[in-house]
Image (cartoon, rainbow, N blue to C red):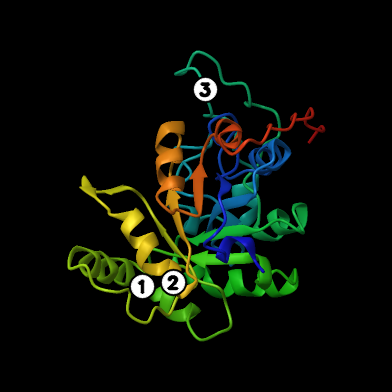
Amino acid sequence: MFRFLDPTQRLVIAHRGNSMHAPEDTLESFRQGMALGADGLEFDVRLSRDGVAVVIHDPTVDRTTNGTGAVATQTLAELRALDAGYRFTADSGRTFPYRGRGVRIPTLDEALAAHPDTPCIIEIKAAEATEAVIRALDAHNARSRVLLGSFSDEAHARLRGRGLQITASRPDVIALFWRALAFRGAGAPSYQACSVPPVWKHLPVPITRFARMLRPRGIPVHAWTINDPREARRLWDGGISAVLSDDPGTMLPLLGRTPGVIPPAESQ
């Protein structure tokens, strides 16, 4: 069974990789997260101007690279020319340890190839990337190890009914929220997992109640983004199956697991 779909598990998923300690959504961050012993990866995908699925969270490259402008207006070659480690700092801007080290925006193909057996959650950030994501999953025979989600209702509509493993959509979560407040059952979900934060736009989300509602139907609840060990322990104890964390090395000891040693990066 795909462990991300097992509600009895207690998992640590590296959110954008080991992103508290390395540039988010990069192969280096993914390498570190898996070396530490995370149970899998979560990352984001958008589409370049020339139709390539690329791994990046924001609609623009400004926050994470030395470039500017929208991802969707730049070709893969233009995106690959950027330094994706340029703005990373772990000490409030005193140092930038990944500048000039060849860290690039990866393609989805590269991410899947670099981690051929790794369970992944892929967040489709733009609906136009949906078909490219599905093609990449099929090219890497990765459907069975990938859980797909999106805040885009259009993307979710494109995913349904195609034999893919998907998370609850935004309308699904809203419906679950109201059912939880009314102490009703979960209904008949059309998704395989529910991935939600404890707080959304300053509104507390009853995610442990979600977990109790969905577990009888075999549907796990994953919580993001959890970097406080006390919160992670509370959520696991409340029935959450996985926490998505920027700092997976800190979460693993809570489960009695010793984090692995991150080997030096190979030259890029």
Q: Distance between the residues labelled 1 and 3?
A: 34 Å
Amino acid type indicated by mark 1? Asp
Q: Is residue 56 above or below residue 129?
A: above
> Nearer the N terminus, badge 3 or badge 2?
3
> Which residue is pictured at 67% across the width and 69% down the height?
1
Looking at this view, is 106 or 212 the one in front? 212
Q: In this view, does 143 lie to the left or right of 113?
A: left
Q: Disc 2 on helix, strand or loop? A: helix
x, y percent for residue 193 = 47, 67
x, y percent for residue 218 = 50, 71
Looking at this view, is 109 or 247 the one in front? 247
Q: How far apart are marks 3 and 2 (CA)?
A: 41 Å
> Nearer the N terminus, badge 1 or badge 2?
1
Q: Is residue 138 left or right of residue 231?
A: right
> Which residue is pictured at 55% across the width and 15% down the height?
95
Mark 2 nearby-residue class (10 Å; few <14, some 14–19, many ≥20):
few
Q: For residue 153, which numbered disc appears in the image?
A: 1
Q: For residue 216, which numbered disc appears in the image?
A: 2
